[in-house]
Amino acid sequence: MKALVAPAYGPVDRLRIREVPDRSPGPGQVLVRVQAAALNPFDVKLVTGELREMFPVRHPFVLGMDATGVVSAVGEGVSRFAVGDEVIAYAGAASGTIAEYVLVGDGPELVHRPRALPPVQAAALPTVAMTAHCVLAAAALEPGDTVLVVGATGGVGALVVQQAAESGVRVLATAAPADTAYIRGLGAHETIDHTGGDTPAKVRQLHPEGLDVVVDLINAGPALTPTAGIVRPGGRLVSTLYGPAEVDGIVPVYVRMTASIGDLPRQAERAAADRMSIEVAATYPFDRAGQAMRDLAAGRYTRGKIVITF
Ligand SMILES: NC(=O)c1ccc[n+]([C@@H]2O[C@H](COP(=O)([O-])OP(=O)(O)OC[C@H]3O[C@@H](n4cnc5c(N)ncnc54)[C@H](OP(=O)(O)O)[C@@H]3O)[C@@H](O)[C@H]2O)c1
């Protein structure tokens, strides 16, 4: 079968579509013929090796974590799925979804695709929706809270904004001027222009008392410290990246998404029922998947997901 492959750690311009060994399902596994697969910033980090200490990969490495497709074979002991079922899959970094076929466990990472959710939108869903769910669980928003989402226009951020707004709290969101109307349309009450930098200073001017909750999807390591400075005493700071164990008396919560708590079935149902909008910035055919990854790495799109179609 064909797959988008990284031959070794290095820049994304070395990605190629190559022949790789066919996959076949072992016990508890499902083989899915891929219809659409989404890209995530994490894919780029796995390719470059930026995270190799924490998340080493074996080469040649097949890229991609999210997909939709049709079950083409099931392994021993699989009872929830049968050949021909249409599914949404989260494969993590284990199997690689930018491939003609992907292997997925018969667990919380694999669900039937609701009929009302088209394959392209469904493929864009798993990583960002499950991460948003984990972020919101960590944020523990309460009535009357004000929350700032840094990175609000991205895949995860847009879902955090929508669900936070739906829960009735006041939502501040970072957005470039061109994306202000978009993010307000998702429910944000105030926007902060992050272009030009120093988001914390801009927020402090508007909210000198500090914010109840800040969700930072952008800043890592020491760069998280200025963000911590705009959380009120006793407030909460949630990050999907990493940083100091304690900053200015605040203990940040560092979210690591897992399918076991990500609740993919509920996310898919919400999207299918139009209760959660997934923006797709662009689709690329499989033979241009390398270009899609280069465009992701170059920041060609400021919002929405990039999806590969087969
Ligand atoms: N821990 C986990 O389990 C986990 C899971 C999923 C994702 N993540 C990580 O979480 C991060 C966000 O993921 P994502 O999929 O939402 O990324 P994404 O789709 O690439 O979105 C990034 C967004 O942030 C905006 N942005 C860039 N620089 C900014 C800044 N300085 N201030 C405010 N906004 C800024 C971008 O818009 P502009 O182009 O307008 O700047 C873009 O809309 C990534 O680093 C990803 O690797 C972690």
Image: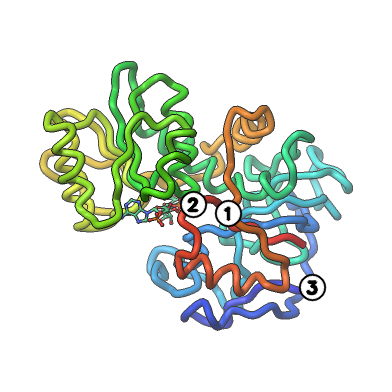
> Where's residue 202, x and y in %?
19, 43
In the image, 79 versus 95, the foreground residue is: 95
Disc 1 marks which residue?
281
Disc 3 marks which residue?
1
Q: Amino acid at mark 3?
A: Met
Q: Quadrant of residue 192?
A: top left
Task: Find numbered disc 1 in the image and state the secondary structure of the residue it sits on.
Answer: strand
Q: Quadrant of residue 281?
A: bottom right
The reply to whether residue 239 is visible in this rendering is no
In the image, 118 versus 74, the foreground residue is: 118
Looking at the image, is 296 positioned above or below residue 125?
A: below
Q: Amino acid at mark 2?
A: Arg
Quarter of the image that includes the C terminus: bottom right
- Which residue appears at 37% of the width and 46% of the height? 175
Q: Amino acid at mark 1?
A: Ala
Disc 2 marks which residue?
303
Marks 1 and 3, Cα distance to the nearest angstrom?
27 Å
Quarter of the image that includes the N terminus: bottom right
Looking at the image, is 303 positioned above or below residue 7?
A: above
Marks 2 and 1, Cα distance to the nearest angstrom?
7 Å
Horizontal arrangement in the rendering, residue 249 relative to residue 91 (left or right): left
The yes-or-no answer for disc 2 within 8 Å of ligand 1 is yes
